[in-house]
Amino acid sequence: QVQLVESGGGLVQAGGSLRLSCAASGTIFIFNVMGWYRQAPGKQRELVAVITGAANTDYADSVKGRFTISRDKNTVSLLMNNLKPEDTAVYYCNADLRGAGREIYWGQGTQVTVSS
């Protein structure tokens, strides 16, 4: 059974930094794509950043230049610099495995709160 375990959320002042990590277990396969999504109260879940097995990345416009995604096999990290109050949300790790079919997995979420 695949599990994604996140760590690293917390409370930080505006302008500060946090690093989120997500480790996947329960599979021998390397995920094609891993990434981070977030959901703020009253809003839909949105993509923050994704990274492929070849280390190609994509970012939401709102975080470009501030956030950096990286991965090592089935562990993905998100370094968040210059955090803003609008970055406050629950951040979810995502893993996408594409073979004969497609399997998508989600972590339980970790809270990031940025105070002004």
Image: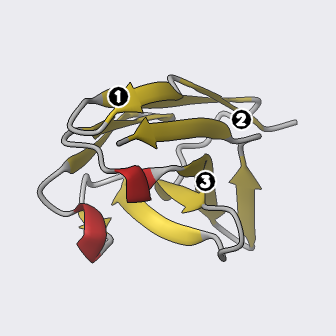
Residue density around tag 3, few if under 14, some if 14–19, many if 20 or more, within 10 Å? many
Quick one: SS at disc 2? Answer: loop
| Residue on which the image places disc 1 | 18
Residue at far right of view: 1
**Marks 1/3: CA–CA distance:** 18 Å
Kind of residue at badge 2: Thr
Kind of residue at badge 1: Leu
Q: Which mark is residue 94?
A: 3
State left or right for residue 88 relative to residue 58: right
Residue found at x 61% / y 61%: 40
Residue 5: x and y in percent read: 68, 28
Q: Residue 40 carries which label?
A: none
Residue 49 falls in which quadrant of the image?
bottom left
| 32 shown above or below 58 | above
| 9 shown above or below 100 | above
Residue found at x 72% / y 62%: 104
Residue at far front of view: 116
Q: Residue 27 carries which label?
A: 2
Kind of residue at badge 3: Asn
Residue density around tag 1, few if under 14, some if 14–19, many if 20 or more, within 10 Å? some
Label tally: 3
Residue 56: x and y in percent read: 24, 61
Quick one: SS at disc 3? Answer: strand
**Marks 2/3: CA–CA distance:** 14 Å
Quick one: SS at disc 1? Answer: strand
Which of the image's four quarters has the N terminus?
A: top right
